[in-house]
Amino acid sequence: MDNHSIELLEFEQIRERVAANCIGEEGAQRITQQKFYSNWKQIKPVLDRVWYLKRLLEGNIQYPDIVLPSITNALERISKEGAVLDPEQIVAVAKFVKGWRSLFRFVTKPMGDGEQSPLAEDYINSPECDSLSQFVFSYFEEDGPIRENLPELKGIRRRIRSAQQELAALATGYLQEYASAWQTNVPTQKDGRLVLPLKTSSKGKVRGVVREVSASGATVFLEPFDIVEKNNQLAFLDHEYHIEVAKIVKKCTGKIRDHREDLLYLQNISSDVDALLAKARYARRHGCNPAEHHARGFRLRRARHPLLGSDVVPIDVELQDDNRILIVTGPNAGGKTVTLKTVGLLALMNQFGMCIPADEGSAIQLYDYVLADIGDDQSIQESLSTFSGHMKNISRFVGSASGNSLILLDELGSGTDPEEGSALAMALLDHFLDCGSTLIATTHHSVLKNYAFAHKGVVNASVTFDAETHQPTFSVILGLPGESHALDIAERSGMSNKILAKARHYIEDQSTDVAQIIKEITEKQRDLRAKETKFEKRQDGLTERVREVDLRSLRIKQREYELRSQGYMQLTKQIQDSRRQLENLVRDLREGELTREKTRAVKDFISEIEEVAEKEQDEISEVGEELRTNQEIKVGDEVLVGASRHRATVLRNARKGYWVVATDKMKITVPETDVHGIVVAKPRERKIQVNLQTETSGPTYHLDLRGYRLAEALESLDRQIDRSLMTNLSEFEVVHGHGEGILKQGIHDYLKNHRSVREYHFAHPESGGFGKTIVKLA
């Protein structure tokens, strides 16, 4: 990339703002030192991860409070044998490990819809250093100080407090006993030892060691002899305390040294993740989306310059397919230079692995160089506003540009004689067109507008101007050359009407047929664009209509399914009723001679009805293929209204989007979205023929005869045995209860003499005992 162009496009401001979103110092350094990517294989994984994190931040997942202190100095220090870390460095390492664990848990969270984080796979094998942070925090508080309740230090701390109390009591005694001898009644510290402020005039009243004399000589800082002994005792205890602390520090340092390689790795990947998260935060704040990869050129949808705040007008601009050069014309302060800078800056952001402030569907080619010559009064460096400054930059571009370069030229051909400047500008455009470079140029020269019409691969664009308000709209229209509106701007600025009239007269004299042709083409293109916009809106409406029709069709199918299911339930009930009728028929037949042929005919009849039921059930799942419905509602139609689906007749169209319908009770006006055409099933030519034969319902294992008279019970028992024999049921149970024993005895007598009964016996006590009999058939 070209450093001067990067500076002109103000990309470093973007870099600084992204770095400010980093959690840790190393992450910010990663952003500051990062280079631009050169191929899509490098950019795509980065954009995928930034995009995932941006959506994660936008979700309802609470962002944790993460701290990532710098551990660079600590890791460098422990690389030297015997070096010991400061307590602050030890705590910083432990905080870093804890912070990384929180960061890792956050960035690897799955989305609410189950989408997995791409970072989870990246760092699945990252080393675990949680035991290290736990070890350190067992000795140190998280805010830094060493823990007071450590066994190693508890006894020493107690003795230190005791010595301090004794020392304070001694000092208080001296201050009270020799009250007139002291400058103040407050002890002080000199070299870590407690001393008393004695007046020079009171020397000799108190025996002790002079530690210091004030600058004025009025005060002697005296350490009485018995306080000397206590100070010595306290010094020894303090020394003992620091020895124990040093042991703890050395122990923690050794533990950290054991994990140095893992910590170096975590420091590296945490910086990467921190940088990705910073880009995601920036993307969230500025409404950014990842750009798609474009083989040649760019396509930007509602692109915004990220440094211009929320009031910036979004622009749609593209240069793709075989088009290589875009010539932007229009009034001053109308947005030409902003368009130039926006395209250049977004191209740099994309190759930095950032989402861009543009809508989804935007796409950008990857460039080897982004070369910018922006030298008017909107530029960063005023020195480039001269023609020579322009030429110096552009000459450099001529030598380095290729088919993969993006070139941005502001006010091409300005700053010199218009005729010569235009000629030079066209020669430069020829050169860059031959190179295949992507180029955007702004200009006021009409000759360059004509150049776009005459050369394949060159496209005009204009920044629009409101003719009524005489104000620029800051929007870009592709395919149309713009006018400078110099006279309109001059009029708005207070220029004399006489001078403006004279200027218009000069313009009319210099007008050419070519200018008139361009104007006519421009008007036709505007009309065409308006028609395209109208067509797009209609297309959107049709798409929505298709969606509504599909939804209505789905509702119809659901309703038909419900109706079919209800029909199946009715058919099932009908079968049950038929079984009862057929049982009566069998009972009648039994009065005559009962043969297996007769009972088989009954069973076949039942099977036929059940087959009809199964067929009906299968057809429920095929409802959608056999439906036809009116696609449009019209007057006279029978319809269903509202969620309750009341049947009604359409009377008339009330107003746009509403129908007047009549139910059996009233007339009502309803929205067309609540009016549903009645689903009509295709007629079936299907006839179920049932030949009435004898039928019997199948036997059951459990036959309950409680409450029956003996004759009725024996009849049911005989019928049960016959059915069981026909269906190969070899065993069943009869419940007769205890009662007076008449029913039980009668059943047993019947079973004893029946030739098809192999054996029978009472049930087990837990299964019914003497109130139930188990029957086994031969």
Image: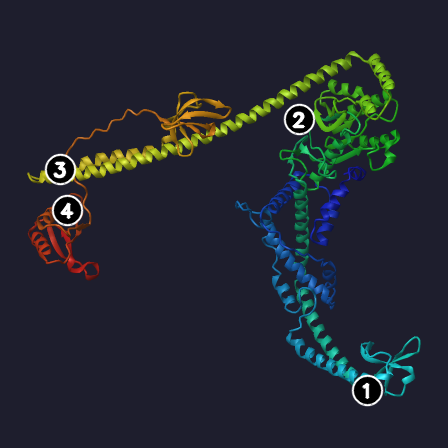
Crowd tier of the residue under label 4, counting other residues whose Cα lies within 10 Å: few below 14, some 14–19, many 20 or above: many
Q: In this view, which residue lies farthest toward the front? A: 666
Residue hosting label 4: 720
Q: For the residue carrying disc 3, how many other residues have a C-alpha within 10 Å: few (<14), some (14-19), or many (20+)?
A: some
Q: Residue furthest right?
A: 216
The residue beneath circle 1 is: 177
Mark 3 or 1: in front is: 1
Q: In the figure, 130 relative to 295: above or below?
A: below
Category of crowding for the residue at label 1, using alpha-carbon neighbours closer than 10 angstroms: few (below 14), some (14–19), many (at least 20): few
The residue under label 2 is which amino acid type? Answer: Asp
Tell me if residue 548 comes above or below residue 3 in the rendering. Answer: above
Q: Answer with left or right where residue 677 lies relative to residue 68.
A: left
> How far separated are the C-alphas under marks 4 and 1?
121 Å
Dot 3 falls on a residue whose secondary structure is helix
Residue drawn at (40%, 34%) of the image: 644
Q: Secondary structure at mark 1?
A: helix
**Distance between the alpha carbons at the discs numbered 2 and 1:** 101 Å
For label 2, the residue is 321
Q: In the picture provided, is 198 more to the left or to the right than 21?
A: right
Disc 3: which residue: 585
Q: CA distance from mark 4 to mark 2?
A: 85 Å
